Amino acid sequence: MTEIIDTYLSMLKRTLGDSTEVRPAPAIAKREDGKMEMAALLGDNGNEVAKMAQKMFRASRPTEFVWGIDRFSKPGQGVDEKYTSVFTVAHLKDGSWCIGAWGYTDADNMADEIDWNNAHWKIKVEAELKSLEMM
């Protein structure tokens, strides 16, 4: 898709390769001046991670931005059932948000690509972006 998405997915995969249970959610902002900012968002729950992403988004005023939340995957959410967890991914580029889902279980069982066509997570994450006033 773009360099920022390739970098983001690489960061997710490295995070899962870590032996610790603490898995910070990466966020990457590309500013108007072309500089990139990266952060590891770590909170007790998805709401805390979302508020950290919101703060970074407002401070950096990015031309491109990607962040996500680590969640449990359940049947009926459009994620392959071989994965027990999912990172939902929100990517802002050219003024529009794309929402995706990346399934995984552990470092040995993860999707190759982000699924940008997951209807369940698209609806849920778009609602979260609106409530955060990021959309």
Image: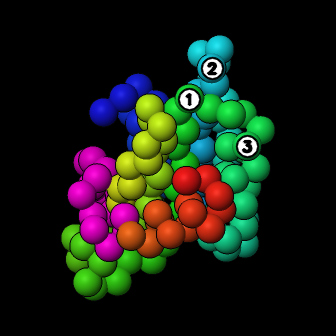
Of pointers 3 and 2, the one earlier in the residue sequence: 2
Quarter containing the N terminus: top left
55 over 79 or under it: above or below = above
Residue in the picture at 39% in, 55% down:
99
As helix, strand or loop, the secondary structure at mark 1 comes to loop
The reply to whether the magenta stretch includes residue 27 is no
The reply to whether the magenta stretch includes residue 104 is yes
Q: Which of 1 and 95 is in front in this view?
A: 95
Task: Identify the residue position indicated by label 1 in the image.
Answer: 63
As helix, strand or loop, the secondary structure at mark 2 comes to loop
1 left or right of 40 in image: left
| Residue 135 coordinates in the image, percent (x, y) | 55, 53
Crowding at label 1, few (<14), some or many (≥20) Cα neighbours within 10 Å?
Answer: some
Mark number for residue 116?
none
Task: Quote the CA–CA distance across marks 2 and 1.
Answer: 6 Å
Task: Quote the CA–CA distance across marks 1 and 3.
Answer: 11 Å
Rendered image quadrant of residue 60: top right
Task: Identify the residue position indicated by label 2 in the image.
Answer: 32
48 over 54 or under it: above or below = below
Which kind of residue does numbered mark 1 sit on?
Answer: Thr
73 left or right of 33 in image: left
Proximity of marks 2 and 1: CB atoms separated by less than 8 Å = yes
- Range covered by the magenta-colored residues: 102-122
Crowding at label 2, few (<14), some or many (≥20) Cα neighbours within 10 Å?
Answer: few
Task: Identify the residue position indicated by label 3 in the image.
Answer: 58
Crowding at label 3, few (<14), some or many (≥20) Cα neighbours within 10 Å?
Answer: few
Residue in the picture at 27% in, 64% down:
118
Residue in the picture at 44% in, 72% down:
124
